């Protein structure tokens, strides 16, 4: 009887799980999935993982996606066993250039497995183009389709004005190899892409007729309500005792050693200030290991400043050739100011805020910090920096965290508001732990609910419309016709980038406060061995690279702020008008930034060559 009871529970539990998965398939991705045709991929022994976001699902989100939805099942060796993806978006410049390059290369230059089976297996009206393709995965294959569709009425969302959007669809295939994917599965992917495009067209009021094909997947969806009721009945019939048995199995057979090794790495690295749960959220369930763990100095030291660095990365599996950098969190905790600057003359004092040339986004919500990604917005690496104002007499703390998840957790993860916020929380929670660990006793911000998305190269405004870090700066014909900015706040690092009518940068003005001002001064004057300009009372001048700078005194002993403007035109080709405009831009930017930070009025910028350092 015991065996019979166990078998009955096992069958009921698997039936319950499949019912839940089918219900999830019906509801996911705004109901756009061809559920009836995908039922064969739905497992009985594992729960589905659904991730969906986008401005058409939540208009208040900071995301470039109109709709982004991924539904996956099962744990393969390096990726889910089966995966479904739908994304609708306004293509950014990096994607457009990549697509144009691929089109220019022609299908003959592409590997056979990457070539589409046809341009598009359904008739498309003017203003719509598309294609389908197939690709092999670690296990099996998948079929994909894409569409670019004109939207004459214009699109609403984060991105600037656009009358074109694109849809991409990826569905699992039964074929073992990409070239064996049958035409019927290409047709299914194409119909799903058309259904998604029509959904966007209608809700965005594009002012065009739906694509006239039989793409709308209505078959098998009408009975969804009854099916859901039946599945709910099955779920209700499962006993609570099954959960106890299941939990016991997971406890004993769920990889206890890997969890122990991961817990040990997370609790010992960086002097124990890492938030273990948040790091796991970023890097997933693969076993984690620590690297480059170093610690020196203390916050109340008089000769050696506090400097703690560490990294956590995914453990590479057997026959897995990926570099450990593909899936890592690197952390640096610095005491501010740096006391032993002479011994660090040949290195920067503090980590960079990221690789982006465009402005970072201020964290806000009570945190003095910034969040930055790459310029295109399609990468999977983000840097968050948080500056803590410690109690008097204890210096300050700067926490810098870089999260790099490669492409292992999905496409463009930083476009996902939830993922972006989870990455930034590693920095804010580390800062809170560091404040307690080294008796900083700083006032902390609130628990992050969201994180702003930094602008990419497509998200510019006319200088006259700028109301953030570029506010007040005037245009200059076609030479300065675009401005990339962030919100004006009290972040320790601010930037405004100006560009010409073609989108090429012409000037960048930057504000450095606290450790970033100290670091800039060190890089520009101390490292190259240049004379200290403040020794002669100099408050503005020209750097060796031709950039102009100025400074302003700030309250609370935080040290002077440092401002600079960089021109991208070769110095020998600059005219007097170029230099006059650059100085005017620096003056406007520095004065507005200093006022927002409650600093004194910056010194007037100078053009005198005798002030070059």
Image: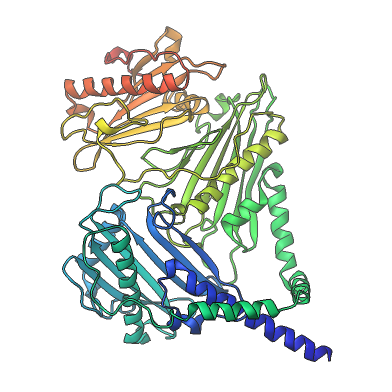
Q: Residue at x 74, y 73 (%)?
A: 243
In the displayed orientation, state which residue is furthest to the right. Answer: 1
Q: How is the image coloured?
A: rainbow
Q: Position of residue 143 (x, y in %)?
A: 37, 77
Depth check, front residue: 260 or 69: 69
The correct choice, above or below, for 310 with respect to 70 in the image is above
238 horizontally vs 389: left or right: right
Residue 110 visible in the snapshot? no
- Looking at the rendered image, the quarter that the C terminus falls into is top left
99 horizontally vs 357: left or right: left
Image quadrant where residue 285 sits: bottom right
- Looking at the rendered image, the quarter that the N terminus falls into is bottom right
Residue 193 visible in the snapshot? yes
Q: Residue at x 28, y 59 (%)?
A: 165
Q: Position of residue 421 (x, y in %)?
A: 53, 48
279 horizontally vs 134: left or right: right
Depth check, front residue: 464 or 240: 240
Say how many tags the image has.
0
In the displayed orientation, state which residue is furthest to the top. Answer: 536
Q: Position of residue 405 (x, y in %)?
A: 51, 56
Depth check, front residue: 262 or 53: 53
Image quadrant where residue 428 sits: top right
The correct choice, above or below, for 148 with respect to 307 in the image is below
Q: Position of residue 489 (x, y in %)?
A: 45, 29
Image quadrant where residue 19 sits: bottom right
Q: Residue at x 34, y 31 (%)?
A: 467
The correct choice, above or below, for 285 with respect to 330 in the image is below
């Amino acid at each position: 009887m015991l065996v019979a009871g166990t078998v009955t529970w096992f069958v009921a539990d698997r039936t319950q799980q499949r019912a839940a998965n089918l219900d999830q398939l019906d509801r996911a991705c705004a109901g756009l999935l061809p559920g009836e045709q995908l039922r064969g991929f739905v497992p009985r022994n594992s729960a589905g993982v659904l991730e969906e976001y986008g401005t058409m699902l939540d208009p208040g989100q900071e995301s470039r996606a109109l709709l982004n939805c991924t539904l996956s099942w099962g744990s393969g060796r390096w990726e889910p066993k089966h995966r479904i993806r739908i994304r609708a978006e306004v293509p950014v410049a990096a994607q457009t250039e990549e697509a144009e390059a691929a089109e220019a290369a022609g299908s003959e230059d592409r590997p056979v497995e990457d070539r589409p089976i046809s341009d598009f297996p359904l008739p498309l009206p003017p203003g719509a183009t598309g294609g389908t393709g197939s690709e092999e995965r670690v296990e099996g294959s998948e079929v994909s389709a894409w569409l670019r569709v004109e939207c004459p009425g214009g699109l609403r969302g984060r991105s600037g004005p656009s009358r074109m959007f694109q849809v991409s669809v990826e569905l699992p295939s039964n074929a073992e190899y990409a070239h064996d994917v049958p035409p019927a599965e290409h047709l299914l992917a194409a119909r799903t892409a058309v259904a998604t495009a029509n959904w966007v067209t209608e809700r965005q009021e594009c002012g065009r007729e739906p694509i006239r094909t039989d793409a709308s997947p209505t078959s098998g969806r009408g009975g969804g309500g009854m099916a859901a009721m039946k599945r709910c009945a099955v779920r209700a019939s499962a006993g609570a005792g099954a959960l106890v048995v299941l939990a016991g199995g997971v406890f004993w057979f769920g990889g206890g050693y890997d969890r122990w090794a991961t817990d040990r790495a997370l609790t010992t690295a960086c002097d124990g200030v890492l938030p273990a749960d948040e790091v796991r959220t970023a890097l997933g369930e693969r076993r984690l290991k620590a690297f480059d763990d170093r610690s020196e100095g203390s916050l109340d030291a008089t000769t050696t400043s506090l400097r703690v660095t560490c990294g956590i990365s995914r453990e590479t599996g057997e026959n897995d050739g990926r570099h450990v950098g593909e899936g890592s969190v690197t952390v640096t905790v610095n005491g501010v100011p740096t006391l032993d600057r002479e011994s660090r003359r040949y290195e920067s004092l503090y980590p960079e805020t990221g690789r982006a040339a465009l402005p970072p986004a201020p964290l806000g919500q009570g945190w003095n910090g910034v969040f930055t990604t790459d310029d295109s917005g399609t990468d999977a690496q983000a840097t968050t920096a948080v500056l803590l104002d410690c109690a008097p007499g204890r210096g300050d703390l700067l926490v810098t965290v870089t999260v790099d998840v490669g492409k292992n957790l999905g496409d463009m993860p930083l476009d996902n508001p939830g993922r972006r916020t989870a990455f930034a929380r590693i920095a804010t929670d580390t800062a809170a732990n560091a404040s307690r660990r080294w008796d900083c006793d700083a006032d902390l911000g609130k628990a992050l609910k969201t994180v702003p998305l930094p602008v990419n190269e497509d998200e510019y405004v006319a200088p006259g419309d700028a109301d953030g870090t570029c506010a007040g700066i005037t245009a200059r014909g076609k030479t300065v016709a675009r401005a990339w900015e962030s919100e004006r706040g009290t972040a320790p690092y601010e930037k405004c980038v100006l560009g010409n009518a073609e989108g090429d940068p012409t000037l960048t003005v930057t504000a450095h406060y606290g450790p970033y001002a100290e670091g800039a001064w060190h890089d520009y004057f101390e490292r190259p061995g240049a004379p200290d300009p403040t020794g002669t009372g100099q408050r503005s001048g020209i750097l060796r690279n031709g950039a102009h700078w100025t400074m302003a005194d700030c309250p609370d002993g935080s040290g002077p702020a440092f401002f600079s403007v960089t021109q991208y035109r070769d110095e020998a080709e600059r005219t007097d008008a170029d230099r006059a405009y650059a100085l005017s831009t620096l003056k406007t930017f520095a004065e507005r930034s200093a006022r927002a930070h409650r600093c004194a009025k910056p010194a007037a910028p100078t053009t005198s060559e005798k002030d070059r350092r």
